Image (spheres, coloured by chain):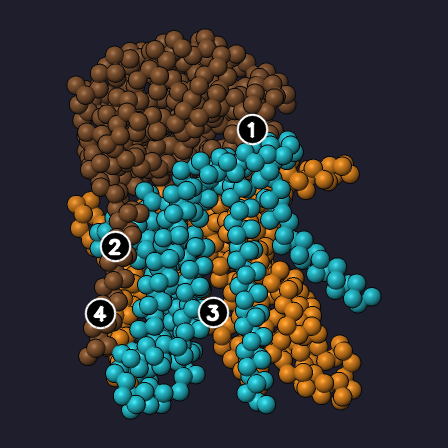
Chain colours: A cyan, B orange, C brown
């Protein structure tokens, strides 16, 4: 009895979560502009989508910004975490406090404050401001993903490497970097996805002449019913699904391997 | 390790991209231009938000619409109150819907160690663009949309789901429900089995175990869930824009409009500061509760 | 010391790639780029065949046509849905072409934000512009009114009236504004009325309904119009939008609403596409309502004036102007296009007002007093 209740509850929740997604996918094949009538099966919207230069250029901008901002913010965050280690506790505390600010303040305020900054300095909004804004909101997340790895790091490792004749750079690259690598990779993935998913901050900092996918979707969705949006969502959903399945399978394997390794150590 | 210098670029970056922008919001909130372009200090922004020149009946948690209390407040205070009541109600609904879901998910993943398929399915829709998922609700809820077409078979409707509090609340619950479920789920997972077993050994039935042991121990998850739902719900301008039929002005839209349309940076910044202070203050209250309640180190 | 050198190197490499990549994504050569800022859905941007009253018209993406004729220019095209939204943007960014409505042109003109057009570079405009538009008064001040065409070339024009569903409301014939606009304020149409998310149209219809001038600054009249709009938002709960409303009229979700005449043509087109009777949606123009002309202008801070002139003139090439007129559905100021369009459209005085109809219509005026008082009213209406 209990099982039936919990099962049907979960079924309802999942229906709620998936209903719109399924509707979008089904209607991406609908040969009618209307959202209520089924006019037959078609691939037309997908074809039109790939001919739509607005969407394609927005996709390009989105990917370039996501890639660059992920790389740059992770890079800066790694340097910062290295630097923070040798800082006095008080100063480090203050820096970490400030780092948290963008995380706890609403996107809306972050976006507006950056827009005001660019306006104040007198930079015209466009690709550079968009990229800077993305780096700015990504860095805190990158730092928060990497810094825990430093806590787990054995401080003596670095000293030991130096004692054994490594130059500082070698010590970092050969000893510290491999230790914090999982954190760095998490930071890269996280910042990349955050950047792709962002709408609000891009909306305020991209200006009028450049557009990310989210901004394009926003202006399309506010206009007429356009089944190209359905096709786009279906594609994005399937892409994410495949990516996540791959990641999950891989991490599952990793978990198994590391579990096996750990067991090996013990025996 | 003497590598302090490596952090310097970031400190500089932080000053420019975190501290300076927030200072600028404050700066614009307190300054304005006169006709010849000179900047002067002013309280105009805050004054016009609080001015009683044009007022409306306060619409907070149904005060006006349900209880007929006619309390005249400045228009922006009303916008603020309307956003707050929608955000509060949506957060509450997220909690009521999300807690059982988190509980069931936690039980499942406890039984079948390692199989996180359900959780995966739960997070999956979150990875799709929020705009698109919200947009999809239009097709479902429209007067001649899917749900109403279905209802019309039984001669019900059409029911007006969109462009009202229901539609916006639904958009919020839909978008933010996972933010409520995930923290509660992870806290529930971390609860030490032996504590639960001890309660059972001491003669507590399952209801008592839940009420006296599990629920109190999951409080930190609830607080961070509330936190993660309330803030975006309070500040969103997308959801009212897409599901509000163009006539919903919540605090997020009001701020967006001030900057992007009216170009009144003074009022826009004053509103942003009000919102920021409010959100940060409520966050603080919540974290305090969270700390008070997390004794026992459940969070680890 | 080695560490610093390698770090510096990596930073440099990252920055260089960033700059390189960003330059190919965003920083196009500005002198070869034409930046256009237009109303949404206000230019033919797709290839299709449109059928108007049994006549087939081929349309294509006119921006692509422009690029084919002027391969040296790259075009950046973005859109807005409200004059008031466009206005702040032109200070923030540099556009080469904007297409504001008449009163906004006057406002920009008064604020010295427009460049004079070089007519020697616009032979098509000279040749094809409809002279019946020449005598329009854009501003109470005749000196300013006379200058408008030195700074702006008409793109499309339209009237503001009521679009309505004939199947539900029957045929309306009374053009008295009090009778026509009454439907907007009729509470029995809760959730089924469409209103434009546009300041002048909303306040204007309300003023017209009450029998006042569209440009009144009398406080009592404006207060009345404001309260009417606020009351409407509460009791009639209109759906507010711009382009998204058209689909809602076509699907029958909305029964009536404020509409630019061109939107009505587009809606009929959509009905026909869907295999429905295009006559289901009708349009009625109340007396004393608004006529507006959207005009192509070059902002003061434009950076590619040469290309801008080429573009304006290109828009007046008969073939291109016809494609736009067919796609957009608004009334064309192009004499040759008027010949090509179906007589059913061009002889309809609601779309193409004759001298007598034009006399009864009012243009919006712009002055500092009007702009600020109307904006204030609009803010209050929106916040309700």
- The secondary structure type at the circle numbered 3 is helix
Q: Position of residue A165 (x, y in %)?
A: 27, 88
Q: Is residue B52 left or right of residue C125?
A: right
Above or below — where is C291 with respect to A240?
above
- For mark 3, what is the residue? B283
Q: Measuring 37% from the left and 61% from the top, which residue is drawn there?
A: A70
- Which mark identifies residue C19? 2
User: How many numbered dots are placed on residues in this image?
Assistant: 4
Q: Measuring 25% from the left and 46% from the top, which residue is drawn there?
A: C27
- Chain under numbered label 4: C
Q: Measuring 28% from the left and 85% from the top, which residue is drawn there?
A: A166
Q: Are marks 3 and 2 on the same chain?
A: no
The quadrant of the rendering that contains the C terminus of chain B is bottom right
- CB under 8 Å between discs 4 and 2: no
- The secondary structure type at the circle numbered 2 is helix
Upstream in sequence: badge 4 or badge 2: 4
* Residue A265 found in image quarter: bottom right
Q: Position of residue B40 (x, y in %)?
A: 21, 55
- Which mark identifies residue B96? none
- For mark 1, what is the residue? C249
Q: Residue furthest right?
A: A1
Q: Is residue C367 left or right of residue C174?
A: left
- For mark 4, what is the residue? C8
Q: Position of residue C354 (x, y in %)?
A: 39, 10
Query: How far is the residue under mark 3 from the one under mark 4?
Result: 40 Å
Query: How far is the residue under mark 2 from the one under mark 1?
Result: 48 Å
């Amino acid at each position: 009895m209990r099982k039936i209740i919990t099962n049907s509850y979960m079924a309802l929740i999942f229906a709620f979560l998936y209903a719109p997604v399924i509707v979008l996918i089904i209607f991406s094949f609908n040969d009618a502009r209307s959202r209520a009538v089924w006019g037959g099966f078609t691939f037309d919207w997908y074809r039109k989508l790939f001919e739509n230069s607005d969407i394609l250029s927005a996709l390009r901008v989105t990917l370039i910004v996501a890639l660059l901002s992920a790389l740059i913010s992770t890079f800066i965050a790694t340097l910062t975490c290295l630097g923070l280690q040798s800082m006095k506790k008080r100063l480090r505390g203050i820096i970490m406090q400030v780092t948290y600010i963008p995380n706890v303040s609403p996107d809306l305020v972050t976006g507006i404050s950056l827009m005001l900054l660019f306006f104040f300095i007198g930079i015209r909004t466009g690709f550079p401001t968009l990229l800077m804004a993305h780096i700015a909101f990504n860095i805190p997340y990158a730092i928060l993903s990497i810094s825990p790895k430093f806590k787990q790091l054995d401080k003596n490792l670095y000293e030991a490497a130096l004692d054994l004749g490594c130059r500082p750079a070698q010590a970092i690259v050969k000893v510290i970097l491999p230790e914090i690598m999982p954190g760095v990779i998490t930071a890269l993935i996280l910042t990349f996805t955050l950047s792709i998913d962002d709408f609000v901050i891009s909306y305020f900092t991209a200006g009028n002449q450049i557009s990310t996918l989210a901004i394009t979707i926003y202006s399309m969705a506010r206009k007429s019913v356009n089944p190209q949006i359905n096709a786009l969502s279906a594609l994005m959903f399937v892409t994410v699904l495949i990516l996540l399945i791959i990641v999950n399978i891989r991490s599952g394997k990793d978990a198994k391997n590391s579990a096996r390794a750990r067991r090996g150590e013990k025996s | 390790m003497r590598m302090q210098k490596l952090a310097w670029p970031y400190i500089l970056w932080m000053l420019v991209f975190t501290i300076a922008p927030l200072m600028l919001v404050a700066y614009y909130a307190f300054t304005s231009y006169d006709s010849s372009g000179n900047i002067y200090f002013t309280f105009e922004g805050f004054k016009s938000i609080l001015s009683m020149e044009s007022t409306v009946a306060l619409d907070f948690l149904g005060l006006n619409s349900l209880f007929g209390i006619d309390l005249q407040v400045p228009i922006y205070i009303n916008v603020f109150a309307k956003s707050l009541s929608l955000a509060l109600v949506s957060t509450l609904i997220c909690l009521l819907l999300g807690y059982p879901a988190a509980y069931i998910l936690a039980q499942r993943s406890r039984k079948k160690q390692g199989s996180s398929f359900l959780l995966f399915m739960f997070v999956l829709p979150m990875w799709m663009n929020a705009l698109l998922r919200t947009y999809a609700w239009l097709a479902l809820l429209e007067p001649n949309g899917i749900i109403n077409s279905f209802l019309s078979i039984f001669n019900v409707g059409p029911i007006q789901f969109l462009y009202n509090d229901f539609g916006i609340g639904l958009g919020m619950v839909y978008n933010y429900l996972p933010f409520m479920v995930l923290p509660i789920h992870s806290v529930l997972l971390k609860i030490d089995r032996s504590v639960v077993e001890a309660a059972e050994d001491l003669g507590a039935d399952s209801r008592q175990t839940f009420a006296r042991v599990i629920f109190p121990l999951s409080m930190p998850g609830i607080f961070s869930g509330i936190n993660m739902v309330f803030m975006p719900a309070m500040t969103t301008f997308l959801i009212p824009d897409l599901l509000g039929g163009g006539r919903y002005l919540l605090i997020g839209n009001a701020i967006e409009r001030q900057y992007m349309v009216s170009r009144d940076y003074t009022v826009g910044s004053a509103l942003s500061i009000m919102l920021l202070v409010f959100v940060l203050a409520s966050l603080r209250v919540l974290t305090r509760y969270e700390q008070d309640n997390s004794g026992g180190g459940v969070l680890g | 010391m080695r560490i610093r050198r390698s770090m510096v190197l990596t930073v440099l490499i990252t920055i260089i790639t960033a700059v390189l990549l960003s330059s190919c994504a965003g920083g196009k050569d500005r002198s070869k780029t034409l930046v256009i800022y237009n109303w949404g859905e206000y230019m033919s941007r797709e290839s299709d065949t449109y059928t108007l009253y049994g006549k087939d018209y081929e349309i294509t993406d006119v921006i692509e046509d422009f690029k084919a004729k002027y391969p040296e220019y790259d075009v950046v095209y973005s859109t807005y849905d409200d004059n008031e939204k466009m206005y702040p943007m032109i200070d923030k960014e540099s556009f080469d072409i904007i297409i504001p409505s008449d009163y906004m042109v006057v406002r920009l003109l008064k604020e010295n934000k427009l460049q004079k057009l070089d007519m020697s570079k616009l032979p098509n405009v000279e040749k094809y512009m409809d002279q019946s538009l020449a005598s329009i008064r854009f501003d109470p001040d005749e000196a300013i009114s006379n200058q408008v065409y030195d700074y702006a070339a008409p793109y499309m024009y339209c009237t503001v009236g009521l679009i309505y569903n004939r199947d539900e409301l029957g045929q309306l014939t009374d053009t008295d504004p009090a009778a026509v606009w009454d439907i907007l304020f009729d509470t029995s149409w809760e959730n089924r009325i469409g209103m434009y998310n546009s300041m002048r149209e909303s306040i204007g219809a309300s003023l017209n309904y009450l029998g006042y001038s569209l440009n009144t600054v009398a406080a009592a009249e404006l207060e009345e119009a404001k309260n009417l709009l606020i009351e409407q938002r509460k009791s009639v709960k209109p759906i507010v939008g711009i382009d998204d409303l058209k689909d809602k009229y076509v699907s029958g979700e909305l029964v009536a609403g404020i509409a630019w005449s061109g939107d009505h043509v587009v809606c009929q087109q959509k009905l026909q596409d869907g295999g429905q009777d295009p006559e289901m949606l009708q349009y009625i123009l109340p007396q004393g309502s608004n006529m507006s002309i959207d005009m192509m202008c070059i902002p003061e801070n434009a950076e590619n004036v040469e290309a801008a002139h080429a573009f304006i003139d290109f828009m007046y090439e008969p073939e291109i102007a016809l494609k736009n007129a067919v796609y957009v559905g608004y009334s064309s100021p192009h004499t040759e296009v008027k010949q090509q369009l179906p007589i059913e459209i061009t002889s309809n005085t609601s779309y193409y007002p004759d001298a007598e109809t034009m006399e009864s219509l009012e243009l919006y005026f712009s002055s500092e007093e009007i702009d600020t008082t109307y904006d204030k009213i609009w803010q209050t209406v929106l916040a309700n």
